[in-house]
């Protein structure tokens, strides 16, 4: 059993379900946060298994979606890939280079290629820096260009994200949420990265502004050939923007497939419940929908259930779900699911 | 159906150091008994301020309801003295908020917070109130209610806190429940649980609801009537099917076009250009004109009133000078 699981993991990582060069390769990635106890002498009494064995590949030019509810480990996965957290175990390869054991200087050089866009445009911009300084900072840190070149680059980037270059001397508080998110995108683009982790980039924005930012991200991807890891909880938006999607639950990927396939033919009961819970803005469609209402709450990742980690809420649970952890298997070409029901 | 509440020309302003904020600008509507009214709008549209105005919860200063009436079962709530309004709040009209963590008192047990209202409004003694509180918690689906009643809010998960808030809101059998973004902070599967619960309770208790949300999907699933707000005005109001099928205001249309739909994934998103207006000026033109794809000269001169739409459902109202049906045909060629 254990052997089969271990075989399945690298097999899944190698799987690329189509053409294109693999840009990022994540294999059996784990990130556990220690829980300490004691006042004077601290000792570790447990661990929050935020990410607990996640494997996937992202191809160049692709948008890969990571969805799940709060606490499922999707943001931690994104941050661990960028080495903002040290991985507990597992491997992250970017263009074939293993990132988890790089020194800080080497990692810093790698960061030119991989950037991040954050969720909260109010917290992610330094309020004491003007826009020009915010966008130029990555250039300064990496010693790119002289002052004149940097100024030109900032003006170019502002234009690129749909802001007037004239705003360069303004401060973040003078902008709306959508505009701030554009500034965050310009900063992420400053070093011409190949790969961007978008961590819930639109969930703090108003509905009418969300579409503006999503369309901007799509246009930039086409123009600059970017690769995105798109982390979100809004399943309709993920379907709209992503080529492939992985669904996470309690630190694990429970299902992964091409976007079309995942939404039309979900296999895992959690994916099914998640999809049926998304409200559709059409009252007639809404009235006819059959909802799978999950009982209870997400278990604590410090103390995940034995067996399948979804067994406490699963509407179609079997007896062996309580004892055996299902391995993730390829149920159709490029479609992976971890459930005893689908074998 | 009989009228439960009539809002007439409700106007709320905030007088701040940076100028007057025109938050709600003379809105009027009727809510019937047992009806669920969905109120949709973005941040700053005045949807929450309108609810706080009805409840008499506008912080003053800087805020003030400067004009209007809220006739609830024959009385104008805005003219009620404070002590009488306190008897209405919680007993006849209850409210649940977005963030159940900040709206529950962290140093009181869940049970104490529910029994407080029961003892105050229904004159129950402690034991009666406690029994009733256990019943209420069980009704909203909290397992082991007899034990959990002595828990503090931090011992509850987000979904359970919102259930406790609902139990508290329903404790005195209100005629009207106002829910302000009640599921926004919750995950989709928990949101589905709460909406399912609210629908069942609404049927059982026969109360009216005002469901405030920015999510057109949630509103579609729960409302009888929907009202869209923009810049402190109602810009469109219609029975739920009409609003989504026969949309007549360019803003509503813009919102629907900018939403991705799970059942229609390949339609490109058309965002609304620009950003919401500065609320520190009372517009003399249509407040949506600067962002409107169909704006004509008249839109820049006069703010359109909310009127019945041409050739539509008799209860379908919109505030727009343009016939959107015709304008869309012209745009589409």
Image: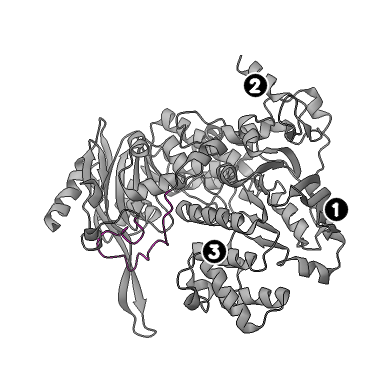
Q: Indicate left or right for A37 with B227 as reference.
A: left
Lower sequence index among marks 1 and 3 = 1
Q: What's the chain of the residue with tag 3?
A: B
Please give the label number shown on residue B328.
2
Q: Indicate left or right for A325 with B237 as reference.
A: left
Frontmost residue, A153 versus A4: A4
Separation (CA) of disc 1 from disc 3: 32 Å
What residue is shown with label 1?
Answer: B69
Query: Overall secondary structure of the magenta stretch?
Result: loop
The segment highlighted magenta reads: A292-314
Lower sequence index among marks 2 and 1 = 1
Q: Indicate left or right for B86 with A27 as reference.
A: right
Q: Quadrant of residue A179?
A: top right
**Label 3: which secondary element:** helix
User: Residue at horizontal 62%, vertical 45%?
Assistant: B223
Frontmost residue, B42 versus A224: B42
Q: What's the chain of the residue with tag 1?
A: B
Residue A167 image offset from top left, x and y in percent: 63, 40
Residue A52 against residue A149 in the figure, above or below? below
Lower sequence index among marks 3 and 2 = 3
Label 2 CA crowd tier, 10 Å (few <14, some 14–19, many 20+): few
| Front label number (3 vs 2) | 3
Residue A7 image offset from top left, x and y in percent: 14, 50
Residue B332 image offset from top left, x and y in percent: 60, 17
Separation (CA) of disc 3 from disc 2: 43 Å
| Front label number (2 vs 1) | 1
Find out whether the residues at labels 3 and 2 contact each other: C-beta distance under 8 Å.
no
What residue is shown with label 3?
Answer: B163
Label 1 CA crowd tier, 10 Å (few <14, some 14–19, many 20+): some
Q: Is residue A210 magenta?
A: no
Q: What's the chain of the residue with tag 2?
A: B
């Amino acid at each position: 059993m254990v052997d089969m699981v271990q075989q399945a993991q690298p097999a899944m990582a190698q799987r690329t379900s189509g053409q294109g060069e693999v840009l990022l390769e994540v294999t059996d990635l784990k990130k556990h946060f220690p829980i300490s106890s004691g006042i004077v002498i601290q000792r570790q009494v447990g661990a929050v298994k935020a990410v607990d064995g996640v494997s996937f590949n992202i191809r160049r030019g692709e948008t890969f979606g990571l969805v799940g509810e709060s606490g499922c480990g999707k943001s931690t996965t994104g941050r661990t890939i960028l080495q903002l957290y040290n991985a507990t175990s597992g491997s992250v390869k970017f263009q074939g280079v293993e990132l988890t054991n790089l020194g800080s200087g080497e990692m810093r050089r790698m960061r030119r290629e991989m950037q991040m866009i954050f969720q909260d445009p109010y917290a992610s911009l330094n309020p004491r820096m003007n826009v020009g300084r915010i966008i130029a900072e990555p250039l300064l840190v990496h010693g790119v260009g002289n002052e004149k070149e940097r100024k030109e680059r900032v003006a170019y980037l502002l234009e690129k994200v749909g802001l007037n270059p004239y705003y360069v001397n303004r401060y973040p508080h003078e902008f709306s949420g959508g505009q701030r998110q554009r500034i965050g995108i310009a900063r992420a683009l400053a070093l011409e990265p190949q790969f961007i982790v978008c961590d819930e980039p639109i969930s703090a924005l108003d509905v009418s502004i969300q579409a503006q930012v999503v369309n901007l991200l799509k246009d930039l991807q086409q123009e600059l050939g970017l690769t995105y890891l798109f982390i979100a909880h809004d399943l309709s938006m993920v379907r709209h923007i992503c080529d492939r999607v992985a669904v996470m639950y309690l630190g694990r990927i429970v299902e992964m497939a091409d976007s079309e396939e995942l939404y039309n033919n979900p296999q895992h009961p959690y994916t099914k419940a998640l999809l049926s819970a998304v409200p559709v803005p059409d009252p007639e469609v809404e009235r006819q929908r059959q909802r799978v209402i999950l009982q209870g709450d997400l278990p604590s990742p410090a103390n995940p259930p034995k067996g399948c980690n979804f067994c406490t809420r699963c509407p179609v649970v079997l007896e062996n779900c309580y004892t055996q952890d299902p391995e993730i298997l390829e149920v159709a070409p490029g479609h992976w699911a971890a459930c005893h029901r689908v074998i | 159906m009989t009228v439960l509440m009539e809002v007439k020309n409700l106007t709320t302003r905030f007088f701040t150091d940076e100028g007057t904020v025109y938050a709600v600008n003379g809105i009027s509507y009727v809510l019937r008994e047992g009806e669920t009214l969905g109120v949709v709008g973005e941040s700053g549209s005045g949807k929450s301020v309108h609810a706080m105005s009805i409840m008499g919860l506008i912080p003053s200063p800087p805020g003030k309801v400067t004009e209007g009436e809220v006739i609830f079962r024959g009385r104008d709530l805005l003219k009620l003295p404070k002590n009488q309004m306190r008897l209405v709040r919680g007993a006849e009209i209850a409210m649940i908020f977005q963030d159940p963590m900040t709206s529950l008192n962290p140093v009181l047990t869940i049970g104490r917070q529910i029994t407080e209202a029961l003892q105050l409004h229904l004159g129950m003694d402690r034991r009666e109130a406690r029994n009733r509180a256990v019943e209420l918690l069980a009704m909203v689906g909290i397992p082991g209610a007899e034990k959990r009643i002595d828990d503090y809010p931090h011992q509850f998960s987000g979904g359970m806190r919102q259930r406790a808030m609902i139990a508290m809101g329903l404790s005195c059998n209100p005629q009207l429940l106002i829910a302000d973004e009640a599921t926004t902070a919750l995950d989709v599967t928990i949101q589905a649980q709460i909406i399912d619960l609210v629908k069942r309770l609404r049927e059982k208790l026969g109360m009216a609801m005002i469901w405030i949300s920015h999510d057109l999907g949630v509103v579609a699933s729960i409302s009888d009537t929907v009202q869209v707000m923009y810049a402190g005005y109602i810009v469109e109001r219609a029975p739920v099917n009409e609003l989504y099928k026969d949309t007549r205001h360019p803003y509503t249309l813009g919102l629907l076009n900018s939403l991705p739909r799970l059942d229609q994934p390949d339609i490109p998103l058309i965002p609304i250009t620009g950003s919401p207006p500065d609320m520190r000026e009372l517009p003399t033109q249509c407040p949506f004109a600067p962002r409107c794809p169909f704006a004509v000269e008249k839109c820049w001169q006069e703010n359109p009133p909310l009127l019945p739409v041409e050739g539509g459902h008799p209860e379908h109202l919109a505030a727009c000078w343009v016939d959107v049906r015709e304008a869309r045909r012209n745009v589409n060629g």
